Image (cartoon, rainbow, N blue to C red):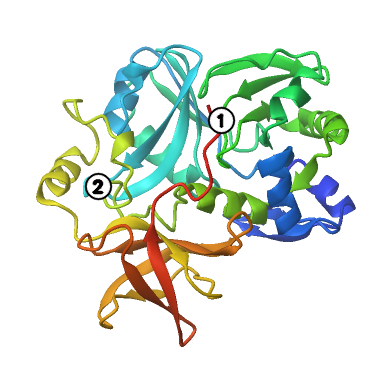
Amino acid sequence: MKNSPLHQKHIQRQAKMADFGGWLMPIEYPGAGVLAEHKAVRERVGLFDVSHLGKASVSGPGSLEFLNLMFTNDLSRITDGKAQYTLLCNDDGGVVDDLIAYKNSDEDFFLIPNASNTADVVRVLQSQAPQGISVTNLHEEFGVLALQGPDAQAVIESLGVNPTMDYMAFAHVMIGGCDVILCRTGYTGEHGYEIVPRWDDAEVVWDVLVQAMQAFDGEVCGLGARDTLRTEMGYPLHGHELTLEITPVQASAGWAIGWKKVNFRGATSLRAEREEGTVRTLRALKSNDRGIPRAGMVVKDMQGAEVGVVTSGTFSPSLKAGIALALINPGLSEGDEVVIDVRGRTSLATIASLPFSPSHVR
């Protein structure tokens, strides 16, 4: 089990810890808990340690063209200093990982994949990279912090940093005397930033942000709240909504595919699936009773026929109800009722629209 560069900070706060992709990370903190941490992000500001996320670099002449062949989205559509959500698929259209690519230049990209998939992403890219292009695993070279919520910009401004930038843009700034990458990205649906310090600077940057948040009644947040926040937004999580068996077309992530590109990994399979139609599609479900859906639970129609499976489920602190993301038959549509098998009990739910909570990322 690997530890974040902020591991001792979490231990000092007596955080409840758990395994996330082979990393021991905080789920929640005493005195607040998931509900209070979630509320802080929606209404004020919260700070997460997400240093378990991977980091890698791709550099050298032709890096843009190479990555455009490897990833689904079209990196030629963004300029230097911008980031893009994209996916690395296999030839069958299955998702090796979803990640964010940060473009420094046509010859220099910084990648943030998921923790447990970083080695696979680096391995695939290294195996395919032409001569002159370097792919480097930087997983334990950088930490990643996420400052999220309506007051996130004010917190950064209080540190003497100008955080005004477009969504999915990034810049190099100084926080606490440390050089960091400040990114207008996040996984909560709120206005926010992800801050990428060097590994050895992570504690300094963390302490500065924790101190600055106090003036805004902010909370240090664990990954439990991060999961409830992202589920309310309908954001996919690899291993749940995206897998080697669940394609981006099925997961309603076709918007992250550059369909006009001539070629990319998985293009033939994904185009065929798009044209023929999927046998299942990602939908949002909202419980009509006290049932709390969980991943793996069976979804049935009102006649009792199995029509799908829950990929992610939780209690929504914003809606005060159970919510879920589920892969279900495309014949069902918004407003239809379904039945979820919640540990042997039947729970009624309605197919809903996403997001469950308004998006404020822009």
Q: Which residue is drawn at 84% across and 48% down?
A: 8
Residue in front for this viewpoint, 11 or 242: 242
When the figure is inspected, residue 13 is found, relative to residue 86, above or below; the finding is below
x%, y% of residue 213? Answer: 82, 33
Label 1: which secondary element: loop
Is residue 245 in sight in this rendering? no
Residue in view at x 44 percent, y 51 percent: 238
Q: Mark 2 points at which residue?
A: 93
Q: What residue does disc 1 label?
A: 185
The kind of residue tagged 1 is Thr
Label 1 Cα crowd, 10 Å radius (few <14 / some 14-19 / many 20+): many
- Of circles 2 and 1, the one toward us is 1
Q: Which residue is drawn at 34% across and 70% down?
A: 337
Q: Quadrant of residue 43?
A: top right
| Placement of 309 over or under 275, stated as above or below | below
Mark 2 or mark 1, earlier in chain: 2
Which of the pair 30/65 is nearer the observer? 30
Is residue 143 among the parts visible in the rendering?
A: yes
Which residue shows up at 87% across the image and 52% down it? Answer: 13
Numbered disc 2: secondary structure? loop
